[in-house]
Every structure is written in structure tokens, then in C-alpha cells.
Image (cartoon, helix red, strand yellow):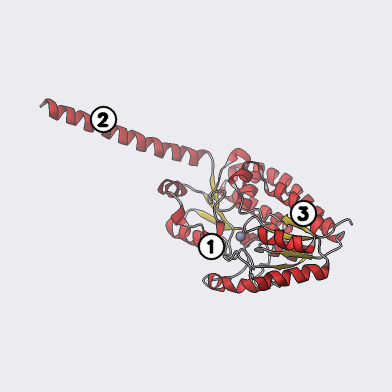
Amino acid sequence: MKKFLKFVSVFLLFSVFVSLSSCQSVSLKDREKKEKPYIVCTVFPQYDFVRNITGDKATVELLIPPGAETHAFGLKDLSVKKIDELYNADLFVCAGGEIDEQLEKELKKMLPQSVRFAELTQFAGELLLESEAENGEDSKKDEVHRSESEEDYDGHVWTSPKRACAIVAKLTDEICETDPNNQAFYRENAREYLSQLEELDRLLEDTVSGAKFRTLIFADRFPFRYLCHDYGIEADAAFEGCSTAVEPSLMTLNRLYEKAMDLRLPAILYTETGDRSYAENLAQKIGGKALLLHSCHEISAKEFQTATYLSMQRQNIETLKVALGSGE
Ligand SMILES: [Zn+2]
């Protein structure tokens, strides 16, 4: 009997603990959801845009963690706990294009229809195809990867500050519809943030208009199609877009070397997504510099602590001044 009572009391204690803990987690989630809208962003640029618009009036989360390979990230990389939390999201902001379309499809299938979805590519004006610009031989390696996608347009729309302005304006509307009670606050924040983006646009226009060169050479991937298109810069790169390939062929490297020599370019560029050693080797051969142009979406854990879209783009402008011989 004593043993039975002990069993009953342990069982009751366990039941109380389970019900208490589940109550607590539900009530915490509900309270968070009630107090603040929960906005989930797949990659860094929109995470930074959204937090600038919402300030502390929304819970804003970066879904693909710093240091992760953005293009390869899927639902399989999320913990059960995280997936459970995502059911409470009010708004998902995806990039669109080849960047996160698989993840977006999986999330849309899984989450209730009440969850809103927005894509940066919807807000960024006319989209460009990955194959539109002059690009490297090695891009052909990526054809299988691209043909699996329904649309092979380039999704790195934020790399152009002009498009970042359009994106932020439309994202603000989206956030105001999600949380109409705070719309005056969001619109005021957006107005201030947009003035900084417009300043970035002016700086970039000045940099290009005062430039000696109009061509950039990337011994790397090429997520800057929109930046180059919108500011009248030509580019040649080892790969189209953020190709899955990372090792350029000797033929491609030779083509880039000859072009850089012909045009007497002062620098070879690389991105944060690839292997900088190819740019460093080419730069050494042409007697120039190897420089990083940051596409702001594959950020490291260290960068995540302090970097912003604006800080990375301001640094990019300094890089472009050197690479384009601006002000010489
Ligand atoms: Zn990319």
C-alpha cells in the first residue's frame, strides 16, 4: 500500500509538472504574440531592414543563423523547438528567387494560411535573370541547380541601394498591415531609415560618376547583378549568382586575368561567400589589390554582432572607389 501511494504521489507530481510546464510555455508564447508581432526573416538584409522599421515594437528574428550557408538552408536544419515557435509568426519575410525559395515552399506547406509571407523580390521592381550579364564559363556547372528552380531570376535584389529603398518602403506597408496599431511609429522609423538609404544611393552614384573604370572583375561568385545593373557598372565573374561551384577553371581565371590586364584594372574582387585565394592570386599577377565586396547575406557570427546593411554598404563604397579608380 505504501509503495502504491508513493507511486500515485510521484505520478501526480509528474502530471502537475507536465501541465504546469506546458501551460507556462503556451502562456509565454501567447503573451509574446499578443504583446508584439513576431516577424521572421530568412536572411540578414531584410532582418536589418525590418528591425530598423519596427524598433522594439516587434520581435524580429533572423531564421538562417549567421555562419550558415544561406542557399543550402532548409527546414531540415531547424530544430523541432524552432519549428514549433514558427507557428506563432505573424509575418515571414523571405528573399525570393533561388536564395530561399525551397525553404519558403516548405514553410508555406507547413504553416497555417493565416501566416503572412512577403518576398523582397516582389518589392524590388523589374527582376534580372541570373544568365543576363556577361559571365564565366564555370557558370554552366550550375545549370542543373538553376533548372530545378521554377524561376531562375537572381534574388540578390538588396545589393542595389536603389532597390533597398523600394523594398523598405513596401516592407513598411506590409508591417503596418500586420500591426496597424503601431503604424505611425513604423512609418516614422522608415522615413528616417530611408533618408540614410537615399544618402547611400547618392554616394554610390557619385563614386561611379567620378570613376576612371567601369568594369569590375570577380574571381568568385557574383551576387551583385542588381548593383551593377542599376549603377551602370559592367562586371565579369567566375560564376553566375551564388553558384554552388566554388572552384573556377584555369580557363576562366585566364579570361579574367586577360580582361583585367587589358583594362588595366587596379583590383580583383571577391565576396564573403567564396574563396578569396583566387582573387589574391589574380591580384598579385596584375600587380593590383584583392578586395572584398560584401553582398550582406552570408554574414559571420562575429559580423552579426555589429554589422548593419548600411555599415557593410558604406564599406563597399570605399572598396568601389579603389576598384573603379574613383576620384583619381
Ligand atoms: Zn547568395
The front one of 8 and 288 is 288
Element type at marker 3?
helix
Marks 1 and 3 in Cβ contact (< 8 Å):
no
Q: Residue at the location (44% across, 37% down)?
A: 28
Crowd class of label 3 (few under 14; some 14 to 19; many from 20; radius 10 Å):
many
Confirm if mark 3 falls within 8 A of ligand 1: no
Label 2 amino acid?
Answer: Leu
Q: Whole-percent x and y of residue 189?
A: 69, 43
The front one of 276 and 177 is 276
Element type at marker 2?
helix
Give the quarter of the image for residue 183.
Answer: top right
Q: Which mark is residue 13?
A: 2
Lower position in the chain sequence, tag 2 or tag 1:
2
Q: Please state if 17 lies on the left or on the right of 164 as rendered.
A: left
Give the quarter of the image for residue 213.
Answer: bottom right
Q: Residue at the location (58% across, 45% down)?
A: 301
Q: Whole-percent x and y of residue 11?
A: 22, 33
The answer to whether one can see residue 191 in this image is yes
Label 1 amino acid?
Answer: Glu
The answer to whether one can see residue 112 in this image is no
The front one of 250 and 304 is 250
Crowd class of label 2 (few under 14; some 14 to 19; many from 20; radius 10 Å):
few
Q: CA distance from mark 2 to mark 1?
A: 46 Å
Crowd class of label 1 (few under 14; some 14 to 19; many from 20; radius 10 Å):
many
Q: Residue at the location (85% across, 57% down)?
A: 326
Q: Residue at the location (59% across, 58% down)?
A: 95
Instruction: Residue under label 3, please give it.
Output: 319
Residue 62 vs 154, above or below: the answer is above
Q: CA distance from mark 1 to mark 3?
A: 31 Å
Lower position in the chain sequence, tag 1 or tag 3:
1
- The outermost residue toward the top is 2
Q: Whole-percent x and y of residue 12?
A: 23, 31
